[in-house]
């Protein structure tokens, strides 16, 4: 009996230590830390999540801006880009607190438009626009524009690689997700406007996960043994996995296929340098975070701000992949 | 005893028939389905789910469940990713650490249930799933990681004449587990524990150790699945930990004849269950069908399988009652 009780206590102790240890380090990492110490202006930044490189970069940018401009920024985000309820709760709680400006990257922009109705504090939409009169500025490029730019660059590269008939199949993310739809629309427009064919009936939904993208790529190679000029994926995870699958299959007809990713993650840049992925369309997350805080500060001080602040798109190919890796690592402090 | 065996056999045959019908339908619908390379990709796709389902089956037989298998697999992959990022690239070290981590997590799951007496593994493994999701993001710094050494990706990517090595390993594991479940005292204790826990304990079996063993195996299989997934995709990403991999594993077991009430289920049935799911998904992908339709069909298949099982069960019970009545 005593032995049992001792064991139970020991386990509980271990669990508690682990929990506190993790709690400690996560608050260091994800710290909703207020950067500017004696800044009068307090800004609340709610992201789509913090659980990916894109958002970690945006957080780094926002924190850098806070330090440069001497304002305090509290940053949070729900656990994943599908945690709609969690983000709704965070926004509601934040709006009820006392801040001088809000930066919101909405998971569901229509929902957020309802939440912020009647607010007088300046609200800035980040990454995804919110269609509401309360929103005074949008900072970002929009997924659609970035995807379109990526698709146009991909068509150029496909022509250079010697493809005569340029067909494109997309490996998409989660069906019904707003970001997914925006990127898909952008890809389709970009491909079609530069003279390619976008096979809309053959879009493969791979839930934004790498292993499902492998399955999708295997199926594409089954249905099109003759090769496809462009494979575009809605994120880098899927694009890298698809490119690797094609390479390992040894199918010669896919040797010149252009693989287009989205996000410009460090690993994707590395994959480009390794000759697997061809290019990736990147939104400038760090700049977006920085500009959002900058705009929010101006708005809080009552200055005029632009309705749209373009944070730019970068198309990463083998020419600039190394430079981007170095830059991002610098931002993330590694 | 004999009767029970026959019943299990029938259930496996039924699932096999379903799989064959499914294959025939797909062959008619798509001329790409019945090709050697496509069938090989089906096998590759089966391996991940089937490995998770193997551990899951043991837990289900004991009337438990392990909801942390998918997150465990992702976490093991992420631990390897973290080590690769820290420039530890010796494949043996990576693989051993991944397997040890997965097994340890299984052990914790088991101890939570048997030594700390948490009410039902549903709760503790759900908690573990969330914990591992966070831990996966933490160890990878929320980044996708690639650049795994060949020795690590070998299991998930190597083929022998087009036939995936991972599937061969899977078959070996399933045969070993089949023998363990049907031919050893431990295996029988596992089935007993699912039938009636108190009776098992009174008959002198250390049921706590038996249960812990099941969760340890589940953790080990999850680690193996994590290694296979790294081999297939070449990357790991902590955000995947929340993917509903465990649902696919549970569905494989249930389609294969396992029951949430415990005491039922076979390795052969589970393998066929995993194949049914992989074939379905492969068919959807070949025909580029919407996710909305995919989800609906998959849901219907799971409900249908359980419905079939329940009907079969009640018919058998009726027959038994009739028999008893005739005797009396």
Image (cartoon, helix red, strand yellow):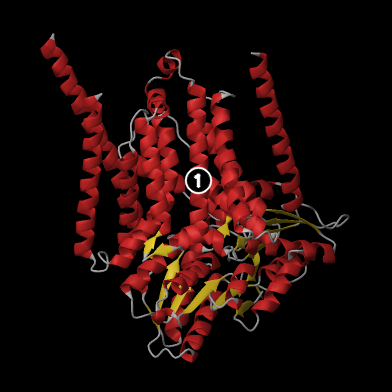
Q: Is residue B251 visible?
A: no
The percent coordinates of residue A239 (x first, y second) are 50, 70
Number of numbered discs overlaid on the protein picture? 1
The percent coordinates of residue A29 (x first, y second) are 73, 52
Asked where in the image residue A171 lies, by quadrant, the reply is: bottom left
Residue B120 vs residue A132, the one in the foreground? B120
Q: Residues within 10 Å of mark 1 (few under 14, many from 20)?
A: many
Residue A277 vs residue B37, the one in the foreground? B37
Q: Is residue A58 visible?
A: yes
The percent coordinates of residue A71 (x first, y second) are 82, 60
Q: Residue at x 48, y 39 (%)?
A: B218
Q: Quadrant of the C terminus of chain B?
A: top left
Q: Quick check: A324 above or below B255?
A: below
Asked where in the image residue B308 lies, by quadrant, the reply is: top left
Name the residue carrying label 1: B222
Asked where in the image residue A299 lies, by quadrant, the reply is: bottom right
From the viewer's perspective, tell me whether residue A11 is left or right of residue B261.
right
Q: Quadrant of the N terminus of chain B?
A: top left
From the viewer's perspective, tell me whether residue B22 is left or right of residue A68.
left
Secondary element at image label 1 = helix
The percent coordinates of residue B82 (x first, y second) are 65, 56
From the viewer's perspective, tell me whether residue A165 is left or right of residue A266.
left
Chain letter belonging to callout 1: B
Q: Residue at x 66, y 74 (%)?
A: A311
Q: Residue at x 21, y 31 (%)?
A: B6
Residue B284 vs residue A288, the one in the foreground? B284
């Amino acid at each position: 009996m005593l032995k049992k009780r001792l064991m139970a206590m020991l386990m509980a102790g271990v669990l508690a230590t682990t929990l506190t240890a993790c709690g400690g380090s996560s608050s260091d990492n994800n710290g909703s830390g207020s950067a500017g110490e004696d800044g009068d202006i307090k800004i609340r930044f709610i992201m789509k999540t913090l659980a990916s490189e894109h958002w970690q970069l945006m957080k780094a940018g926002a924190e850098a801006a806070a330090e440069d401009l001497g304002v305090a920024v509290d940053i949070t985000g729900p656990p994943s880009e599908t945690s709609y309820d969690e983000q709704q709760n965070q926004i509601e709680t934040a709006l009820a607190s006392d801040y001088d400006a809000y930066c919101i990257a909405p998971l569901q922009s229509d929902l957020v438009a309802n939440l912020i109705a009647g607010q007088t504090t300046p609200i800035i939409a980040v990454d995804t626009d919110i269609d509401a009169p309360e929103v005074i500025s949008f900072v970002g490029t929009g997924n659609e524009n970035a995807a379109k730019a990526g698709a146009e660059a991909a068509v150029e590269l496909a022509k250079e690689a010697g493809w005569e008939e340029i067909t494109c199949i997309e490996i998409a993310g989660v069906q019904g997700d707003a970001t997914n739809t925006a990127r898909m629309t952008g890809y389709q427009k970009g491909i079609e406007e530069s003279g390619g064919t976008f096979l809309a009936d053959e879009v493969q939904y791979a839930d934004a996960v790498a292993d499902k993208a492998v399955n999708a790529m295997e199926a594409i190679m089954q249905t099109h043994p003759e090769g496809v000029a462009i494979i575009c994926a809605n994120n880098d995870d899927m694009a890298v996995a698809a490119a690797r699958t094609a390479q390992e299959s040894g199918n010669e007809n896919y040797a010149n296929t252009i693989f287009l990713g989205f996000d410009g993650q460090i690993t994707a840049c590395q994959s480009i340098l390794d000759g697997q992925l061809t290019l990736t369309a990147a939104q400038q997350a760090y700049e977006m975070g920085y500009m959002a805080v900058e705009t929010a500060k101006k708005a809080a001080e009552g200055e005029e701000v632009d309705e749209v602040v373009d944070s730019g798109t970068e198309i990463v190919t083998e020419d600039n992949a190394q430079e981007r890796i170095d830059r991002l690592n610098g931002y993330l402090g590694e | 005893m004999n009767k029970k065996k026959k019943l299990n056999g029938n259930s496996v045959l039924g699932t096999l028939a379903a799989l064959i019908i499914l294959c025939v339908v797909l062959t008619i619908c798509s001329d790409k389905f019945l090709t050697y390379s496509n069938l090989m990709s089906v096998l590759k796709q089966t391996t991940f789910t089937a490995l998770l389902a193997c551990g899951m089956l043991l837990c289900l037989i004991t009337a438990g469940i392990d909801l942390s298998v998918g997150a465990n697999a992702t976490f093991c992959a992420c631990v390897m990713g973290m080590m690769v990022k820290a420039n530890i690239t010796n494949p043996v070290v990576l693989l051993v650490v991944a397997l040890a981590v997965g097994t340890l997590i299984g052990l914790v799951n088991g101890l939570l249930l048997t030594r700390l007496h948490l009410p039902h593994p549903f709760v503790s493994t759900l908690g573990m799933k969330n914990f591992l999701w966070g831990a996966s993001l933490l160890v990878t710094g929320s980044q996708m990681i690639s650049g795994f050494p060949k020795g690590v990706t070998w299991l998930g990517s190597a083929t022998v004449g087009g036939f995936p090595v991972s599937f061969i390993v899977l078959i070996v594991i399933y045969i070993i587990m089949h023998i363990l479940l049907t031919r050893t005292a431990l295996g029988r204790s596992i089935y007993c524990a699912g039938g009636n826990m108190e009776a098992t304990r009174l008959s002198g079996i250390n049921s706590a150790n038996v249960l812990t063993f099941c969760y340890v195996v589940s953790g080990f299989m999850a680690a193996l699945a994590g290694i296979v997934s790294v081999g297939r995709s070449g990357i790991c990403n902590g955000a995947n930990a929340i993917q509903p991999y465990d649902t696919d594993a549970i569905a494989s077991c249930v389609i294969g004849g396992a029951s949430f009430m415990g005491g039922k289920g076979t390795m052969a049935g589970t393998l066929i269950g995993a194949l049914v799911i992989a074939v379905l998904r492969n068919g959807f992908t070949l025909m580029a069908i919407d996710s909305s339709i995919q989800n609906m069909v998959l849901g219907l298949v799971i409900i249908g399988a359980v419905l079939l099982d329940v009907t079969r069960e009640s018919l058998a019970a009726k027959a038994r009652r009739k028999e008893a009545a005739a005797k009396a």
